[in-house]
C-alpha cells in the first residue's frame, strides 16, 4: 500500500506499507508527481508502516521514473520519515545529504508530534 494525502497546499503525507509490485509503484509515483505539481518549498511526512523490499519489476519502474522523481524532490525543503527500522532511518538521512536543498530527518513512528514540529519549524 502506498497512499499520498495532500495535507495542505505545500505538504504531502505518504503512508507506505508492505511490498509494492511494478503496477503499484507506477501508480504511486504518478500520484506523488501529480499531487506535488503545484507545491513550492514543500514539506513531506513519510510514514513507513511495514517496509518490505519492492519486487524487481517495481525497482525497474522506479529507475525508469528517476527524472520525474528528481524533479519532484526539488519542490520539497523538508521530509520527516517515520520508521522503527534503524537502517531505514540512517538510509533516509543519508539521502538528505545526497539531495542539496532537501533536509531529511528520521523519527521513530511514535514520535509523530516531534516530526510534525520539525516540519513546521
Image: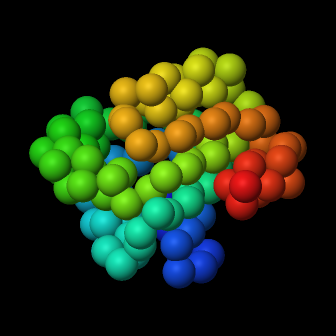
Q: Is residue 3 visible?
A: no
The vertical placement of 63 against 1, above or below, is above
72 to the left or right of 114: left
The residue shown at (35%, 51%) is 73
Taking the image as drawn, is residue 82 in sight?
Answer: yes
Q: Nearer the viewer, residue 4 or 12?
A: 12
- Look at the picture and state if 6 lies above or below 83: below
Identity of the residue drawn at 37% across and 35% down: 99
Quadrant of the rendered image containing residue 119: bottom right
Residue at the image point whose x is 59% and y is 64% from the top: 13
| Position of residue 24 measured from the top left corner of the image (x, y, whole percent) | 35, 58
Q: How many marks?
A: 0
* Quadrant (top left, top right, bottom left, bottom right) of the C terminus: bottom right
Q: Nearer the viewer, residue 83 or 73?
A: 73
How is the structure coloured here? rainbow
Q: Give the left or right position of residue 114, taking residue 58 as reference.
A: right
Residue at 59% in and 21% down: 90
Residue 109 in the image: state x and y as whole percent. 78, 42
Q: Position of residue 115 (x, y in %)?
A: 75, 49
In-front residue for pair 41/37: 41
Q: Residue 35's x, y, as percent?
A: 39, 75
The answer to whether 109 appears left or right of 106 in the picture is right
User: Which of the pair 119/64 is nearer the observer?
Assistant: 119
Amino acid at each position: 500500500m502506498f497512499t499520498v494525502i495532500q495535507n495542505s497546499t505545500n505538504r504531502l503525507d505518504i503512508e507506505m506499507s508492505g511490498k509494492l509490485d511494478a503496477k503499484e509503484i507506477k501508480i504511486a509515483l504518478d500520484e506523488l508527481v501529480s499531487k506535488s505539481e503545484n507545491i513550492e518549498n514543500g514539506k513531506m511526512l513519510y510514514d513507513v508502516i511495514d517496509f518490505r523490499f519492492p519486487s524487481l519489476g517495481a525497482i525497474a519502474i522506479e529507475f525508469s521514473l528517476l527524472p520525474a522523481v528528481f524533479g519532484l524532490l526539488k519542490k520539497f525543503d523538508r521530509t520527516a520519515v517515520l520508521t522503527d527500522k534503524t537502517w531505514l532511518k540512517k538510509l533516509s538521512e543519508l539521502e538528505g545529504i545526497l539531495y542539496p536543498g532537501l533536509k531529511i530527518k528520521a523519527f521513530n513512528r511514535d514520535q509523530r508530534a516531534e516530526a510534525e514540529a520539525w516540519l513546521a519549524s
